[in-house]
Image (cartoon, rainbow, N blue to C red):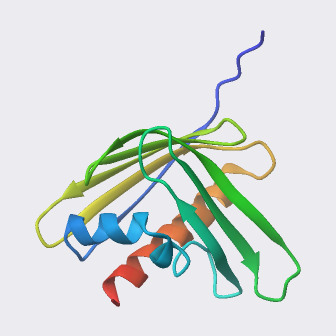
Amino acid sequence: METMNKTAITIEAIVNAPVKKVWMYWAEPQHIINWAFASDEWHAPYADNELREGGNFKTTMAAKDESMRFDFEGVYTAVKAHELIKYTILDGRKVSISFTDNGSTTHIIETFEAEDTFPAEVQQTGWQAILDNFKKYVESN
């Protein structure tokens, strides 16, 4: 069996909110649908999230003009409340997200394995845009 090394891409943000709020907004479907997309031309019409080790998640991301849509889904492999989330996307790629509590701010560092279709820079830009959208959503609520 051939093993291929995946390129790891890291993005980050400092959210001006305590980790308890950040965690809640990251985890609850009623919040996920408000931030899980990279641009204003897209939205997330559906989210389901069972944030526990072995739990599943699924978020539908769709173009508002209905030209494209896909489900982003996977299984959680590790969850440490307010600190760490690890999961495997259905295509087998791994993701790790750390949340560092700095009192009134939370530092999020997200590392994911790149897929082979798009250049790493494009993937980094897209994932960072989603994280930036999350930051904006949390800070405005």
* Position above or below: 81 against 49: above
- Quadrant housing the N terminus: top right
Q: Quadrant of residue 103?
A: bottom left
* Position above or below: 39 against 125: below
| For residue 112, side relative to residue 70 (left or right) | left
Viewer-side residue, 131 vs 138: 138
Q: Quadrant of residue 61?
A: bottom right
- Residue at 22% x, 64% y: name it: 19
Residue 15's spot in the image, x, y percent? 30, 72
Viewer-side residue, 11 vs 106: 106
- Quadrant housing the C terminus: bottom left
| For residue 84, side relative to residue 31 (left or right) | left
Q: Say if residue 99 shows up in the picture.
A: yes
* Position above or below: 42 against 6: below
Of all residues shown, which one is farthest toward the left? 103
* Position above or below: 7 against 118: above
Residue 17's spot in the image, x, y percent? 23, 75
Of all residues shown, which one is farthest toward the top? 1
- Residue at 45% x, 74% y: name it: 134
Residue 82's spot in the image, x, y percent? 25, 54
Q: Say if residue 133 shows up in the picture.
A: no
- Residue at 43% x, 39% y: name it: 53
Residue 42's spot in the image, x, y percent? 70, 81
